[in-house]
Amino acid sequence: MADRHDLLFKTLADPTRRGIFEHLCSQGEQTVVALTAQAGVSQPAVSKHLALLKQAGLVRDRHQGRQTHYSAQLAALAPLADWTNRMVGYWESRFDDLEDLLKRMDQ
Amino acid sequence: MTETRSVIVEREMPHPPEKLWRALTQPHLIAEWLMKNDFVPSVGHRFNLRGDWGGVLDCEVLTVEPNRSLSYSWDFAHDDPAYALKSVVTFTLTPSPKGTHLRMEQVGFRPEQKQAFGGAKAGWQQFFVKLEEVAGRAD
């Protein structure tokens, strides 16, 4: 699980790569050409970023004719939610105990 | 590798902020709902939170605004980076018609890249906010 986390974070730590991923999240399936138009880097650089995103399971590619279409895989982000979920559960139960304490305390 | 996540838990408490403040800042009261500790509500004071599970958190008081806001670092040193954590916990108390609105925000970092503390913090938070918006629309 830690390795999976590391790969996801490492992949998304790069701002350009994160930008590409965000763009795919908000705009849906895109070609490399369309992604390059908004990424502000060269097409080979975009392709390299896409390969890394794919390796991390964050994007999927679909070949159609000479074009490759890329789409975001939101499910790949699930491991990132785990830490958050654990901590939310922890603090919710601490707040339960805090409420109990407040009831017992003098004004 | 840096992991940055923010956790927010909020609850309406039917008690005045002054009373909540005592529960958040008096060591014997903190021990009753959080962990054993040697807390002092003074900026720069270093203290430990000791869990029943044997773990010890290294903390430092960062801000103290009586009855309004309290924050401290919440660090856990561990040889395995998967368990190590650097984070900041902030409690915000806002008076409400029924008592107090209590908000806890914990922003966590994996410790390997300390330089990422400043710059990456904003970036990651924005990223997740945006992503949650997008994910919300996708449903």
Image (cartoon, coloured by chain):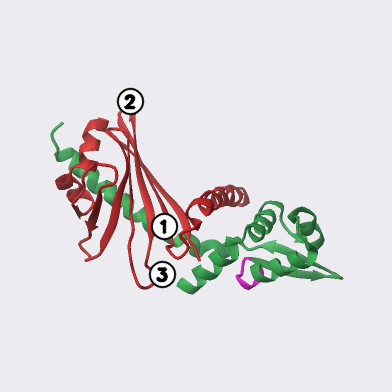
Chain colours: A green, B red
Q: Which one is nearer the viewer's eye here, B25 or A104?
A: B25
Could you confirm whether marks 2 and 1 are on the same chain? no
Crowdedness near tag 1: few (<14), some (14–19) or many (≥20) residues, C-alpha within 10 Å:
few
Query: What's the residue type where badge 2 is placed?
Result: Pro
Name the residue carrying label 3.
B82
Image check: B69 left or right of A82? Answer: left
Tell me whether circle 3 and circle 2 mark residues in contact (CB < 8 Å): no
The span picked out in magenta is: A54-58
Q: CA distance from mark 3 to mark 2?
A: 42 Å
Side of B50 where A23 appears, left or right: right
Q: Secondary structure at mark 2?
A: loop
Main secondary-structure element of the magenta-colored stretch: loop
Is residue A1 at least partly visible in the picture? no
- Image quadrant of residue B14? top left
Q: CA distance from mark 2 to mark 1?
A: 30 Å
Of mark 3 and mark 2, the one earlier in the sequence is: 3
Residue shown at the point (78%, 68%) measured from the top left? A44
> For this view, does A69 lie left or right of residue A2?
right
- Residue at the spot of label 2: B97
Marks 1 and 3 sit apart, C-alpha to C-alpha, by 16 Å
User: On screen, A63 above or below A39?
Assistant: below
Q: In the rendered structure, which amino acid carries the disc numbered 3?
A: Ala
Please report contact status of discs 2 and 1: CB closer than 8 Å, yes or no: no
Which of the two discs, 1 and 3, sits closer to the camera?
A: 3
Q: Which mark is residue A85?
A: 1
Disc 3 packing (10 Å; few <14; some 14–19; many ≥20)? some
Whether residue A1 sits left or right of residue A10 in the image: it is: left
